[in-house]
Image (tube, rainbow, N blue to C red):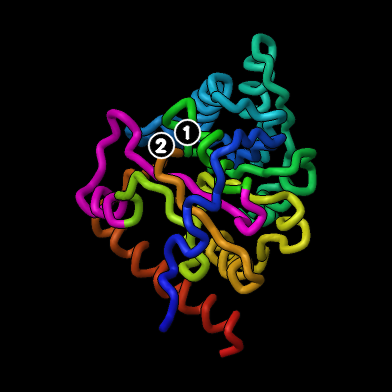
Amino acid sequence: MKADPVDQLGLDQLGTSPFRPGVSVVIKTFDDSAVAARRSFPSLPELLLETLHALETQTLPPQEVLVVDSSPGDGIARVIERFSTTSALTIRRLPIDLESFSYPRALNLGVQAAQCEVVVSLSGDATPANDEWLETLVAPLRNPDVAGAFSRHVARPGSRLSWAERFRLWWRYRSEATAVRRVDPVFSNASSAFRWDLAVRFPFDESLAELEDYAWARTMQREGYALAYVGESQVYHTHCRSSLRTLWRMAYYIYLRMRIDARMSGG
C-alpha cells in the first residue's frame, strides 16, 4: 500500500526541545515606486520597511538580513540606510542587475552570501504576520530529515482581494496545522526556510523563470528528505489581481508543474 504523503515522519519526531539556529533572512525586492501609485497597494520599499520592523520583534531574531535588490536606482538602499540607523538588525544589500534578475538567481545569490546554517527566503511583497513567524517556520528543521519548511499565507489587512484570490488562499493555505510530507512537493519561497548546506549542494534551478521552489522541493524529496508546511508561521502574501487573471495564473502553474515533472522524470 502506498504510504500517506502527509506526516510520514510523525509530528512527534520533529521534537519539542528548543531549536534556535542561526538564521539568514534573504529578501528579494525591487523599487517599484514609479508604478505603485497606480495601484491600491503599498510599494515594495514601503513593504520592505514593514517587513524589517516585523523582523525586529521576532521571538527568534535573525542573525542577518540580506536584501537582494534588482532596482536600477537607490530607493531600496535608502530604506535600508534609514532603517539601519536605529535598528539592531544586521542588514546587507546585495545588488543584482535587473537584466539578469530571476527569482532563483536572486535566491542563489543570497544563499552564497549567507553566513548561517538556516536560510529563510522572503518575497519583497511578503511580510511576517506574527512574532512567532520565524521561530515556528524553522522548528521542523530540528529534524535532520526535513530539508525545508514554508509558511501559511494570509491576506494582508485591508487588502481588496478578488473572489478567485480568496479561493486560492483558502484552497492552498487553509490549514493552521503543521504537515510533514515526503511526496507532495508543494513549496513556496515567498516564505520558506531551508538548510544552507542543501541549498549549496542543490541550488535553485536558474533555468526556470518561476516555480524554482517546486522543482527544488521535488529534488529534496527524491533525495530522501521531507518538507514541512507550518500553519503557525503566517505571512502576509496576496495578489490584488482580477479573478480572471488569478484563475489564468493557477492554470498556468499547473502547466508549469507538469513540465517540471516531465523533465525531472526524464519524460
Pointer 2 local density, CA inside 10 Å: few below 14, some 14–19, many at least 20 = many
Pointer 1 local density, CA inside 10 Å: few below 14, some 14–19, many at least 20 = many
From the top left corner, tell me how far across and down residue 91 is, in percent: 71, 26
Res 124 seen here: yes
Instruction: Indicate the secondary structure of the residue bearing disc 1.
Output: strand
Return the residue at label 1. 127
Tell me what residue is drawn at x 55 percent, y 49 percent.
14
Pick the front one: 215 or 20: 20
Q: Quadrant of residue 87?
A: top right
Instruction: Tell me the kind of residue under disc 2.
Output: Tyr
Q: Is residue 60 above or below residue 107?
A: above
Q: Is residue 141 left or right of residue 256?
A: right
Q: Residue furthest bottom?
A: 267
Pick the front one: 43 or 199: 199
Return the residue at label 2. 236
Q: Is residue 110 left or right of residue 174?
A: right
Instruction: Tell me the kind of residue under disc 1.
Output: Thr
Does the segment drawn in magenta span residue 181? no
In the rendered image, the quadrant that contains the C terminus is bottom right
In whole angstroms, how far apart are the C-alphas of marks 1 and 2? 5 Å
Q: Quadrant of residue 24?
A: top right
Q: Which residues are magenta?
A: 143-171
In the rendered image, the quadrant that contains the N terminus is bottom left
Tell me what residue is drawn at x 76 percent, y 53 percent.
197
Q: Is residue 199 above or below residue 56?
A: below
From the top left corner, tell me how far across and down residue 75 is, in percent: 62, 27
From the top left corner, tell me how far across and down residue 174 is, in percent: 30, 49
